[in-house]
Image (tube, rainbow, N blue to C red):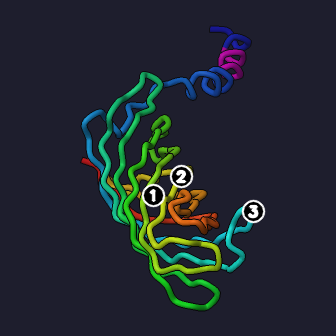
Amino acid sequence: MSIKKKNLTLALLPIVLLVWVPYVRCESSLQKGMTEWGFSVGYGDNFHIGHDVTEDVAFYFLTHFWGRVLKNWSDGGSLEFVAEGFLSFVQQDSVDRYAIGVTPLIAYNLKDFGKVIPFLELGLGILYTDLDPEGFGSRFDFTPQAGFGLRYRIGHGKFLKFSYRIHHVSNADIDEDNLGIDSHLFSVGISFLK
C-alpha cells in the first residue's frame, strides 16, 4: 500500500468510527422477563404555579421499588412496569408532617450505552398524608408524576440510579378544597437486576 493510501486510510478511520459506532447495537441489560428492585432516597421542594397551596412544602423521602421488563425493541430500548412504595418526612412551613403512598409507573428504558442506561417514567399513585395547608382538602390524594433519569452500572446487575420527577399531589376534587402541591423530586438509589 502506498503512503498516500495509508494516510488516507488513517485519516478516514476516525471519521468512519465516529459515524458507525453510535449505530452499533449494544445488547441491553434489561431483557424481557427480568426483574429489577432497589431503594432510593431523595428530596423534593414545591413550586407555585396556578391552583396550588401557598405554603412551602419540602419532602425528604425513601422509596422501595420493584419492576419487570415487559418488552424489548430492536433499537435497544425496553418497556418496564414498576411498583414503588413511598415514605416521606414532610416539612410544611417548619411543621413536621408525613406522607405514605404507592405508585405504579411505566418506564421506557432507552438504549443501553454500556455503563449508562437513560430512562423516562410516567405514573399515577395514591398518597395518604397529614399535610394540611389551607385549601388542600383531603388526607387521601392522588400523585400524577413524570420524570427521567439514568442507571449507572457499578457491577454485574448492580446500578446506581439517579432520577428527577415533576410530582403533583391533589385529591382530584374528592373534597371541596383541592389546591395541589407541585414539586421537583430528586433521588439517588441503588438497583439490582435479575
Quarter occupied by residue 100: bottom left
Secondary structure type for disc 1: strand
State which tag comes first along the sequence, 1 or 2.
2
> Is residue 27 depicted above or below 185 in this figure?
above
Badge 2 density bin: few <14, some 14–19, many ≥20, Cα 10 Å: some
Residue highlighted by disc 1 = 161
Secondary structure type for disc 3: loop
Q: Which mark is residue 91?
A: none
Residue highlighted by disc 3 = 49
Q: Are marks 1 and 2 in contact (CB under 8 Å)?
A: yes
State which tag comes first along the sequence, 3 or 2.
3
Question: Which amino acid type is marked by label 1?
Answer: Lys
Residue highlighted by disc 2 = 149
Whether residue 62 is visible: no
Residue at (50% x, 46% y) in the render: 122
Relative to 65, 48 lies left or right: right
Whether residue 144 is visible: yes
Q: Is residue 193 magenta?
A: no
**Disc nearest the viewer among 3 and 2:** 3
Quarter occupied by residue 186: bottom right
Secondary structure type for disc 2: strand
**Image coordinates for residue 18, horizontal then vertical, percent:** 64, 27
Q: Quadrant of the N terminus?
A: top right
Question: Which amino acid type is marked by label 3?
Answer: Ile
Residue at (36% x, 58% y) in the render: 84
| Outermost front residue | 176
Distance between the Cα atoms at labels 1 and 2? Answer: 7 Å
Mostly what secondary structure, the magenta segment?
A: helix
- The residue range painted magenta reads 6-12
**Disc nearest the viewer among 1 and 3:** 3
